Each structure stands twice: as C-alpha cells, then as structure tokens.
Image: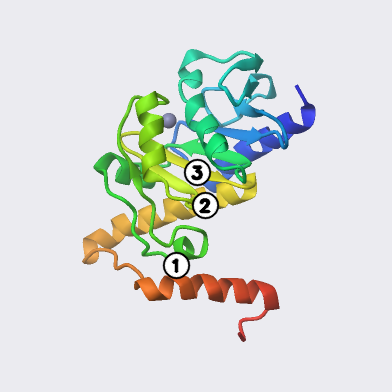
Amino acid sequence: MDADFVNQLIDAAQRVVASGAISANGHGNVSLRVPDSDEMYFTAGPSLRNHAASAVVRIGLDGTLREGELPPIQGAVVAMHTAMYADNPDVGCVLHTHSPFATAYAVAHRPIGCWVEALAMFGLPTGVPVAGYGPRGSEQAVANIRAAVTPGVPAVLLANHGVLVFHRTPDLAIMVGGIVEEAAQAGIRAGSIGGPVEIPDELRAAALQRAMAFEAKGTARV
Ligand SMILES: [Zn+2]
C-alpha cells in the first residue's frame, strides 16, 4: 500500500464530510485511480466519518482485491467505481454518497434540472440525470448508470439509492458533489413557492463562457 495514496484518499474522505454533502451516518465511498496503472485505492470503511487509514484497500480495475480487507457490503459497490474509470480515461476520482437532498431526487426518480448556475458552469448544463434502479453495484445498476451518463457529465443520481460523482481530481469531484446537493436543496425549497425555473438553454453556455473568461482574465470585466 502506498502511503501517499492512502493519505490522499483519507484527506478526500475528510473533505467530503466537511463539505456537508453527505448523510448523517456518513455513508459513502471514495476511490482514487492510481495514475498510469490498472488499480484504485478505495475506502472500505462503513462511514467516511473518521475513516481509518487501515480500512483503505487497493483494488484492480477488474474488481479484484489486491490488498487490505474488503467487507462484502462495501465490496458490492466497487463495480460502480471501476466502471467509471474504465469508461472515462480522464477520471481520477469517484465519489458516492447519500447526500440527503440529492438522494430525495433519486428516491423520487426525478432528475435535477439546470436551475442553479453552478450546474451550467461545472459540466451539468443539462442537469443531473437519474440512473434506473438496480441492486447496488449489480450488472443491472452499472448498465443503468452507463445508459444515463452522457460524455462529459460528471454526476448521476442512482434511483432509490444516492449519488455518484466522477471527475479528474478529488477537488473537482467534491466540489461537484456539493453543487449537486445545493441544487437539490434549492429545488426542493423552491417547490413550495412555485417550483424551480431552469436557466434557458441558450444562456447555459453563456454561464460557462463567462466563468471561463473570468478565470482567464481574473476580472469580471469581460
Ligand atoms: Zn450507497
């Protein structure tokens, strides 16, 4: 086990907890792809809260456990992580939680629309899709995730289960997880005052372009 990857993974788990985009019991899992290899490091503990370094495992992208102890309940979701790495060569981190507001949409089988600007700015201009239900980590569940995700989309709701986020780095995955949760919370709260209103299609690209121009110039005067 490489201590650097273990530390990066524990650090990412702590930052997911600190972000608040997680259920009260802290359930979830994070994985990191080892660059230029066929393996990942994975949190095999029951909760991301105070996740022990000793509970990190190393797993081949074919799903084979290579080092550490993997309880069956955590092993069941490994295939969701490995599938995202297999499908997306750029993805370096996969994050799964039951963050409460996003999970409410997943339970209702309702996609999150693009009614929060940050979704348009961070790869979700068409909102967050829902992958149909299948028992966690099953072939059916993984096939449903693959069917729901279009190229470039970094997050998907898992029907009757939770949220899956996959991105180049832990920082980006954690940020997108927080944005999805925030959008879900806003959507549910807006439901009591007439419902959320989506950003018009043509302005979603504008939101992204403005963010990119701002980043390039370091000024809002673009
Ligand atoms: Zn789960």
Residue 24 in the image: state x and y as whole percent: 44, 35
Q: Is residue 65 above or below residue 9?
A: above
The residue wearing badge 1 is 117
190 left or right, relative to 16: left
Q: Earlier in the sequence, mark 1 or mark 2?
A: 1
- For the residue pair 165 and 63, the one nearer the viewer reads as 63
Q: Is residue 218 above or below residue 70?
A: below
Residue 158 in the image: state x and y as whole percent: 37, 38
Q: At x 32% / y 67%, what residue is drawn? A: 198
Q: Look at the numbered disc 2 and give the secondary structure of its residue.
A: helix
Q: Is mark 2 within 8 Å of ligand 1?
A: no
In the rendered structure, which amino acid carries the disc numbered 3?
Val
Cβ–Cβ under 8 Å for marks 1 and 3: no
Residue 7 in the image: state x and y as whole percent: 73, 33
Q: Residues within 10 Å of mark 1 (few under 14, many from 20)?
A: some
Q: Residues within 10 Å of mark 2 (few under 14, many from 20)?
A: many
Residue 176: assigned label: 2
In the rendered structure, which amino acid carries the disc numbered 2?
Val
Residue 28 visible in the displayed image: no
The residue wearing badge 3 is 165
Q: At x 58% / y 44%, what residue is drawn? A: 18
Cβ–Cβ under 8 Å for marks 3 and 2: yes
> Spatial distance from mark 1 to mark 2, Cα to Cα?
12 Å
Residue 128: assigned label: none
Q: Is residue 44 above or below residue 167?
A: above
